[in-house]
């Protein structure tokens, strides 16, 4: 079970948890003002797609919705946090020293570890509430993660083995 949670955390963090808080812009279809804004909006849309996919794939019940909402909100928050840190890194890239670059990378790595802990903590009660069938679905879904969190199938569905 620990392996499943680790795989889940990695999958969610790298596959779409790098969103920015630009939901109104993405939701209304307004054009992004900078390439960074456009990239952030795209990442946010990916997070929302991942949340919707997992909700459907894991067959979340109405009784599980409170745990699910907590988990999904952590995904969004983590994405906003990582997006902010990467945006700061990109903005400072041309002017920072090697040591500043390393310090900033360490900050991102620490934030990622902290965010993953929060994600696992939010997922545990949800996973514990799953039926045996749902646990099997979750285990299978997250076992099929590869290439830094990309799902094996292009359609959003896991690849068939």
Image (cartoon, rainbow, N blue to C red):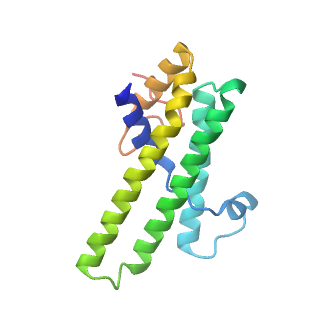
Residue at 57% of width from left, 22% of height from top?
129
**Residue 103, position as x, y percentages in the image:** 29, 71
Identified at 64% across, 27% down, the residue is 60
Q: Out of 40 and 7, give the one closest to the viewer.
A: 7
How many numbered marks appear? Answer: 0
Residue 154 visible to an observer of this rendering: no
Which residue is most to the right? Answer: 28
Image quadrant in which you'd find residue 58: top right
Q: Residue sitting at 48 percent across and 39 percent down?
A: 121
- In the image, taking residue 48 as reference, residue 28 lies left or right, namely right
Q: In which quarter of the image is the C terminus?
A: top left
Q: Quadrant of residue 109?
A: bottom left
Image spot of residue 99 (x, y percent)? 24, 77
On the image, the x and y values in percent for residue 155 come to 54, 36
* Horizontal side, residue 10 vs residue 38: left or right: left
Q: Quadrant of the N terminus?
A: top left
For the question of whether residue 98 can be seen, the reply is yes
From the top left corner, tell me how far across and down residue 10 is, in percent: 40, 42
Residue sitting at the far left? 98
Residue at 62% over, 34% down: 67
Question: Farthest residue in the bottom direction?
Answer: 95
Most extreme residue toward the top is 132
Vertical placement of 37 versus 6: above or below? Answer: below
Give above or below for 153 relative to 26: above
Q: Nearer the viewer, residue 149 or 105?
A: 105
């Amino acid at each position: 079970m620990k392996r499943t949670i680790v795989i889940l955390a990695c999958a969610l963090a790298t596959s779409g948890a790098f969103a920015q808080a630009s939901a109104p812009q993405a939701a209304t279809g307004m054009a992004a003002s900078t390439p960074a804004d456009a990239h952030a909006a795209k990442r946010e849309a990916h997070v929302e797609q991942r949340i919707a996919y997992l909700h459907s794939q894991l067959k979340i019940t109405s009784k599980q919705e409170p745990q699910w909402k907590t988990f999904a909100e952590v995904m969004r928050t983590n994405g906003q946090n990582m997006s902010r840190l990467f945006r700061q890194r990109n903005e400072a890239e041309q002017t920072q020293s090697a040591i500043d670059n390393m310090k900033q990378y360490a900050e991102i790595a620490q934030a990622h570890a902290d965010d993953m802990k929060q994600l696992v903590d939010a997922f545990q009660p949800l996973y514990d509430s799953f039926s045996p069938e749902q646990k099997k679905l979750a285990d299978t879904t997250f076992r099929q993660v590869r290439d830094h969190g990309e799902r094996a199938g292009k359609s959003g569905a896991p690849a068939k083995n």
